[in-house]
Amino acid sequence: MNIAKLLELKIPLVLASKSPRRIQLLENLGFNFKFIDADVDESIDTEIPPEAYCIHLSWLKAEKVSSMLDYEALVIGADTIVVLDETIINKPQDKTEAVKFLSELSGATHQVYTGITLMNSKDKNWITDYQKTNVTFRILSVDEIEAYVESGSPMDKAGAYGIQDDFGAVFVRNIEGCYYNIVGLPLELLYSSIKKFTERV
């Protein structure tokens, strides 16, 4: 029995994201789902606490996709950010910024936050939560950083790295917390949230 069958969802599942990493993780759990790019404006106040930042963006994504549907579904919104020394690091705008981000993360411990929102597209009932993971990088060489950036992989990722990448995997020296949170979708939190959401409605 897979996780999707265990939860016995009575309505369709929709992921408010086109992230290949989130899609793959949901598929691994055995879910049958659709995905729709939420495409929300992510230029919100970065001075607010990181947990509030990622939760708010996950809610915006879930709400936008919910408003696009003409049928009842459980919509998952998720947003992942990287925080170093209390500063939010989003996706790099160009290769120069990607090099800058990775240089700052080199040899340091940062935090990865993922906010998730579950929303019923029919009645707009929703719940939110977040996961936090501490990640420590080893000291990176200039050649390693430049080679990774030239590969193009960092350009669509918060903090300019993906732990599931070949380079990203060998950059990380230590993790405290959920690995899947760093990939972009904390699976235990998602499972617990869906279970809680479906049991209360």
Image (cartoon, rainbow, N blue to C red):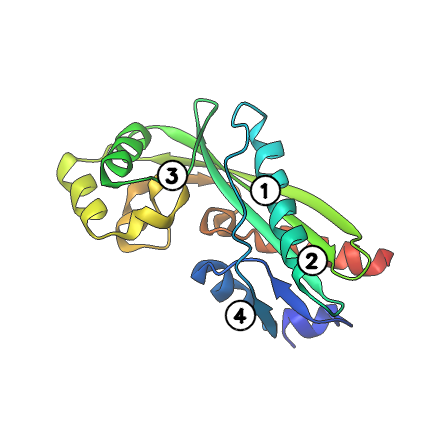
Q: CA distance from mark 2 to mark 4?
A: 24 Å
* Residue that label 4 marks: 27
As drawn, the label of residue 159 is 3
Q: Against 174, is 108 above or below?
A: above
Residue 12 image offset from top left, x and y in percent: 70, 71
Residue 123 image offset from top left, x and y in percent: 82, 57
Query: Which secondary structure lies at badge 1?
Result: helix
* Residue that label 1 marks: 57
Q: Is residue 128 left or right of residue 150?
A: right
Residue at the image position 69 percent from the left and 58 percent from the top: 66
* Image quadrant occupied by the C terminus: bottom right
Residue 190 image offset from top left, x and y in percent: 64, 54
Residue 33 image offset from top left, x and y in percent: 60, 71
* Residue that label 2 marks: 67
Residue at the image position 71 percent from the left and 63 percent from the top: 74
Q: Against 27, is 52 above or below?
A: above
Give the residue type at disc 2: Ser
Question: For the image shown, how many numbered marks are present on the structure?
Answer: 4
Mark 2 neighbour density, 10 Å: few (under 14) some (14–19) many (20 or more): few
Query: Which secondary structure lies at badge 3?
Result: helix
Q: CA distance from mark 1 to mark 2?
A: 15 Å
Q: Earlier in the sequence, mark 2 or mark 3?
A: 2
Question: Mark 2 near mark 4, Cβ–Cβ under 8 Å?
Answer: no
